[in-house]
C-alpha cells in the first residue's frame, strides 16, 4: 500500500519561505509523476506542481510559477516543495500524491486516497 507522509508546514509571514517534504513508500515510482496539491480553507483541492520521477521534468500552476520549486531525491523516495515569496493566498493544507499520467496528476479530484497533509499558514 502506497503511503505519503507530508511535513514541513507551519506559520510564516508573507514574503517568507518554507520547504515541504513528502516521504513516499509502498512501491517504486519509476515512470510515474509525483505531485504537490493544496486545499485552501473552504475550497476544493487544487494542483500545485508535479515532477517526473525519472527525468525530472516539472510543471507548475500559474499561481506559484517563479515562487515554488519541486524536486525529488530518488534515493530517499522523497519529494520536496520549496516555497518562496509566500502570500496569504498560499494558506492551505498541502498534500502529495502520484499518478501514471500528466492528465491525472493535473486533476486531484481523480485521486482516491490522500495522506494527512501539512498545514501552511501565511499571515499578512
Image (cartoon, grey):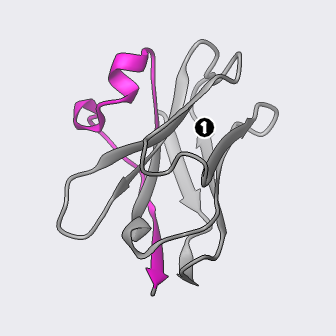
- Asked whether residue 104 is drawn in magenta, I would say yes
User: Which sits in the foreground, 16 or 7?
Assistant: 16
75 left or right of 120 in image: right
Label 1: state its secondary structure. strand
Residue at image position (58%, 25%) is 27
Image coordinates of residue 24 in percent, x first then y, are 60, 41
Q: Is 98 within the magenta?
A: yes
Q: Which residue is mark 1?
A: 25
Name the image quarter holding residue 7: bottom right
Is residue 22 in view?
no
- Magenta highlight range: 97-123
Q: Quadrant of the C terminus?
A: bottom left
- Nearer the observer, 27 or 47: 47
Q: Position of residue 58 (x, y in %)?
A: 60, 29
Residue 117 point in image, percent of width and height: 44, 60
Relative placement, left or right, of 62 versus 55 is left
Residue sitting at x 22%, y 37%:
109
Number of numbered discs on residues: 1
Q: Residue at x 56, y 32 (%)?
A: 26
> Image quadrant of residue 111?
top left
Looking at the image, residue 22 sits to the left or right of residue 39; the answer is right
Amino acid at each position: 500500500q502506497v503511503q505519503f507522509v507530508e511535513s514541513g508546514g507551519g506559520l510564516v509571514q508573507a514574503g517568507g519561505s518554507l520547504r515541504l517534504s513528502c516521504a513516499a513508500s509502498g512501491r517504486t515510482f519509476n515512470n510515474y509523476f509525483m505531485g504537490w496539491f493544496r486545499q485552501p480553507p473552504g475550497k476544493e483541492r487544487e494542483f500545485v506542481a508535479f515532477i517526473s520521477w525519472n527525468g525530472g521534468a516539472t510543471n507548475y500552476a500559474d499561481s506559484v510559477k517563479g515562487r515554488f520549486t519541486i524536486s525529488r531525491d530518488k534515493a530517499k523516495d522523497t519529494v520536496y516543495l520549496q516555497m518562496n515569496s509566500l502570500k496569504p493566498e498560499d494558506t492551505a493544507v498541502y498534500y502529495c500524491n502520484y499518478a501514471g499520467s500528466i492528465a491525472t496528476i493535473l486533476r486531484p479530484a481523480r485521486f482516491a486516497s490522500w495522506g494527512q497533509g501539512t498545514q501552511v499558514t501565511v499571515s499578512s
